[in-house]
Image: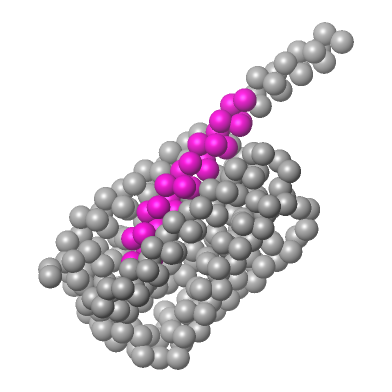
Amino acid sequence: MEYNPLLSVLTAAVEIGGAVWALNGPGRKPLIRTTASILLFLAGYQIVEAVFCTGLLPFTGSLLPRLAFIVVAWLPPMGLLLVAQLFPTSSRAPYWFAEFMFLCCAVLVGRIATSPGFVTESVCMVVFARYTNPTPLYQTYGLFYQTGLMSMLLLSAYGVTICDDRRQRLLLGQVQLGSLAFIIPALVTVSILPIAENALPSILCHFALLLALFLLRLVAIERKYEAGAAPALMLDNARGAVS
């Protein structure tokens, strides 16, 4: 069936609009910037896929498909950074792990960028793309990606169980639920639909719209608490001035 870019375009529009909305409002800036960055990387994949599947640019070979893999490679470390920013302990271990994953990502991205044979064939079908990745580098990429996603899911779940602060627990819960919402349906889709073979990267990114919606809810919760904290802070300042 012929590829239709409508799903990619609409998904990218939601994710870009959500990132702009997140950045133009209250909330803890590091947290908001990380969330917005994840949304923009998700949108970046949708744009790249739509461009090479519709032939909008006259590129040949594996350049654009490799760019798609490069864009989404940054999502696991960005997700781990978000979890680290929300983690309820003072330990730096979650940050160290996120930094390690960023380093691994940079190495992988460099290798993919200089390896034309990383993707040898891309077939666009209906609303997703199938890729052929014959080199061992793809196995390393897959291990990195799966480790990042599973770590993001497990660390956010563990953070929820040990967190005493309701605000942080709610925010971590959005990351946990968002991770479940896109990982599990993507894996099920690939396992039960023969047409989806070799399409896991594309299908993951399409289901990641669900993650994006949970991240937007995370921003909404953060804004709600910030809005509630502002009057309390003003009241405290007024009391201090009177005393």
Magenta residue span? 202-228
The rendered magenta stretch, by its main secondary structure, is classed as: helix
Q: Was residue 105 drawn as part of the magenta stretch in this picture?
A: no
At which x and y percent is residue 66?
A: 36, 76
Name the residue located 65 percent from the left edge and 44 percent from the top edge.
168
At which x and y percent is residue 167?
A: 64, 39
Horizontal placement of 199 versus 159: left or right?
A: left
| Residue 47 vertical placement versus 107 (above, below) | above
Name the residue located 32 percent from the left edge and 53 percent from the top edge.
12
Frontmost residue, 32 versus 7: 7
| Residue 49 vertical placement versus 19 (above, below) | below
Q: Was residue 212 drawn as part of the magenta stretch in this picture?
A: yes
The residue positioned farthest toward the left in the image shown: 2
Identify the image quadrant of the N terminus. Answer: bottom left
Frontmost residue, 179 versus 47: 179
Identify the image quadrant of the C terminus. Answer: top right
Residue 146: tell me if it is visible.
Answer: yes
Horizontal placement of 86 versus 24: left or right?
A: right
Residue 23: tell me if it is visible.
Answer: no
At which x and y percent is residue 208?
A: 40, 58
